[in-house]
Image: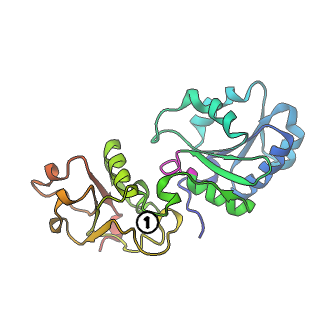
Amino acid sequence: MTQHLPFPGSRIAVVAITRHGIALAGKVVAALPGARLFAPEKFRTEAEAAAPDAACYTGKTGDQIPALFAAFDGIVCIVSLGAVVRLIAPYLKNKEADPGIVVIDEAGHFVIPMLSGHLGGANALAGRLATALDATPVLTTASDSRQTLAVDLLGRELGWTFDASHDEIVRASAAMVNDEPVALVQETGSTDWWAKHANGRSGPLPANLKQFARLEEIDPAAFGAILWVSQRELPPGWVAKLAGKRVIYRPPQDSAQ
């Protein structure tokens, strides 16, 4: 399945700091039309051969990070994982604001989404690049490694948005991956969300996910989280019943059923 990226190629930076890394970066840029290569000035010849519009910088790579964080939604680093951790650590804010960051080893064997795998799109970006490079994606997010439902990605490919606090997302996500009972109440929107979910799921729905057609059918106390797909506002009395454990999804109006 084609990986759905939450941002265009023009919002992706590729950082490489060695000759061999820059050669691989040329393949990465080719797989992501619009992406731009950033490399040290001393490798300008190699960088421009790999990607004609490469940006070459003087000084330390770490000094480029603030500008890259501000200008790009996805950053691909052909740099060791440990080095990337040290480079980006001073600039991290939160999962809603940080860019999706993917690390690739210089040999192009492994593609690792290391930051903002879900909301920041790093998992999807890693999947796209693993396919293009014939590499192995190394996914460590629990929902992806277990192929279960990712609460913060439900319906994204279909244009759904969600309404939930950070704590509610954390609680619902924990309920899913820890096999607690989770209610999925779908009153509207396409029902073809599982096959498209998180760039593709196969097989049956997770056993701990119970489906309902109306919110009023459920007993909130019986579930660790409630995922409600609807165009309605919460009925009177339900705000308190669902406090702390609800995630509300809003499909586009033209997809409502």
| Residue 170: x %, y % from top left | 36, 46
The x and y percentages for residue 122 are: 57, 50
Residue stretch rendered in magenta on the structure: 116-122
**Element class at badge 1:** helix
Q: In the image shown, does 252 or 208 lie closer to the viewer?
A: 208
Q: Is residue 204 above or below residue 51?
A: below
Q: Quadrant of residue 65?
A: top right
Provide the residue designation for mark 1.
158
Along the viewing direction, whichever of 64 and 247 lies nearer the viewer: 247
Relative to 16, 64 lies left or right = left
Q: Is residue 183 above or below residue 46?
A: below
- Residue name at image x 17 percent, y 56 percent: 221
Give the quarter of the figure containing the N terminus.
Answer: bottom right
What residue is shown at x 38% (from left), y 52% (from top)? 173
Q: Main secondary structure of the magenta part?
A: loop
Horizontal side of 42 relative to 170 (left or right) equals right
Say whether residue 157 is magenta.
no
- For residue 182, what is the image quadrant? bottom left
Badge 1: residue crowd in 10 Å (few <14, some 14–19, many ≥20): some
Q: Please name the amino acid that badge 1 sits on.
A: Leu
Q: Position of residue 84 (x, y in %)?
A: 66, 36
Q: Nearer the viewer, residue 158 or 18?
A: 18
119 in magenta? yes
The image shows residue 148 at horizontal and vertical percentages of 44, 63
